[in-house]
Image (cartoon, rainbow, N blue to C red):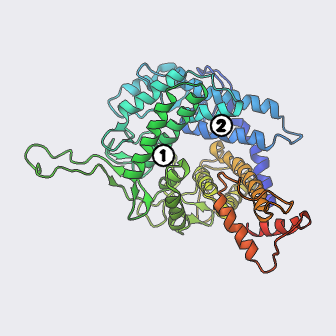
Amino acid sequence: MDVKRVKIVEDYFKTKAFGMLRPAGQGFKYPYLDPGEQYLAQLWDWDSYFAAEALMSICEYFKKDDDFDYEEKRAAVTEAAKGCVLNFLDIQLPDGFIPIMINPVMLEDGLWIKEHQSPGTVNQHKPFLCLSALSVSRYCNDYEWFDAEKMVKYLDYYKRNQWHERTGLYIFKSDYMIGIDNNPSVYGWPYGSTADIYLNSFMYMELCAFAELLEKRKDPRAARYRAEAERLKAAVRRECYDPIDEFYYSVFIRLGENHKGIIHSGMPVFWNSLPVKLRHVSSFLPLYAGIATEEQTSRIIDKYYLSPEFLSPYGLRSAAENERFYCLKGTSNPSNSLGPVWVIYNYFAFSFLLKAGRIRLARDLLDKITAVLAADVEQSGKTDECYDPNTGKPIMGKSFVSWNALIIKMYGDMKKIQRMIKLSFLAAVFPRGTGCGTGLGGIRGSHDAAYLRRICAGVRRCRKFRKPSSTKNAKICNSAFFCCF
């Protein structure tokens, strides 16, 4: 990676990201995270989860720097990350409903209560509440600070009000505040007519997160939520994966509603859903969530991620370039995810590439996003919400910090994975008995032992490489290792 560009991005987020911290007050009982300078005292569901992930990573990334007050910042981030969850739980309604966003006006006049009472149109807090609690609990090694019963009520509300029994999938009630604002498989569709792949991917992660939180408390209900997560995973694979296209899609679920009485009674609609075949970045989320199989993941990366319709010179597009809805217009209501490059979607791609052992692809993607953000910081002193995939220029959302700060987590993850692979590489090339390693037998994990074996085999086939017999030849291994990247 370009060292100068990385330094520009590091220096920017090292200080700027902590501007998301907000104290209690204005109706908020607890400190929280506000995603960017253009917002005024707003707490959002999935924004706060990824903002907290970014800030915790930034604390660890810079902890050894002399000019970084690690203990103070770590404590502030932990308190605010917990506060995001506690503020949402604090305004939960008796039926379990929690709103998507909180601001002082809502808290003062009870707007979320009035909206919730409107018939069947308001979506609940997207599935990031348990994920947020798990993330900060792991960070501070404390799993007792929140009310688990409120989370049970929150998940029960989802099951009663936003779950489609026939498919086993979750739905949005409307296209109001759906995370990916103009997600083409929900936006503009009849309300409740599709089961969205974004919602179901993160709901799977949410159920897994709550199961882990309960396991840490030795709560026997953990098994129930593990089982629910597995059933949802099976439903997503069954209903949303299209074996013809070899891709995941959202699905249309309102089938056969007009068939009543004797008309068409000889053959009722017997299929549960039909794929909404729109090539959008949300279709990659089963890879990030851990729903896609290894074979599916590999095929989707090769067939779709690497296609020029998705992968641009400046990162992964939010929609395939040759889709009829492809658009690069800068809009704020809704924010546009029909083509522009967003850091958050590229973070998802970077993460599933690492998990799949596609390290070089992950590094190349990180290079692209670094170049985009560094250029924006150099030219404007700020970062934007999204960028033009053809030029790398900003499109919309000046002074947007939020999940853009995940770039620092990406740097940290890349450094970590390279250290792991380097050690594994040395162990593989220096087998047991050479005095230089322990072999590959004990190596397991996300860096993909099979992938490492392929690298090592390729190096051994190199005519200039001779199998080392002592630690003196470690430099040969190091050089060969870096050639693989």
**x and y, in percent, of residue 381 in the image:** 74, 50
Q: In whole angstroms, how far apart are the C-alphas of marks 2 and 1?
A: 20 Å
**Neighbour tally class for label 2: few under 14, some 14-19, many 20 plus, Cα within 10 Å:** many
**x and y, in percent, of residue 367 in the image:** 70, 61
Residue 379 is marked as none
Name the side, left or right, on which 2 lies relative to 203: right
**x and y, in percent, of residue 117 in the image:** 36, 25
Does 261 appear above or below 481? above
Residue 201 is marked as 1
Write the residue at 69% across / 55% down: 373
Q: Which quadrant of the structure image shows residue 164?
A: top left
Dot 1: what SS? helix
The residue that disc 2 covers is: 52
Which amino acid, mark 2? Answer: Ala
Write the residue at 43% across / 42% down: 232
Q: 146 or 328: which is nearer to us?
A: 146
Quadrant location, the N terminus:
bottom right
**Neighbour tally class for label 1: few under 14, some 14-19, many 20 plus, Cα within 10 Å:** many
Quadrant location, the C terminus:
bottom right
Camera sees residue 125: no
Which amino acid, mark 1? Answer: Ser
Does 58 appear above or below 103? below
**Residue sticking out furthest to the bottom:** 463
Name the side, left or right, on which 263 lies relative to 409: left
Name the side, left or right, on which 28 lies relative to 270: right
Does 430 appear above or below 333? below
Dot 2: what SS? helix
**x and y, in percent, of residue 286 in the image:** 50, 51
Disc 2 versus disc 1: nearer the observer:
1
**Residue sticking out furthest to the right:** 472
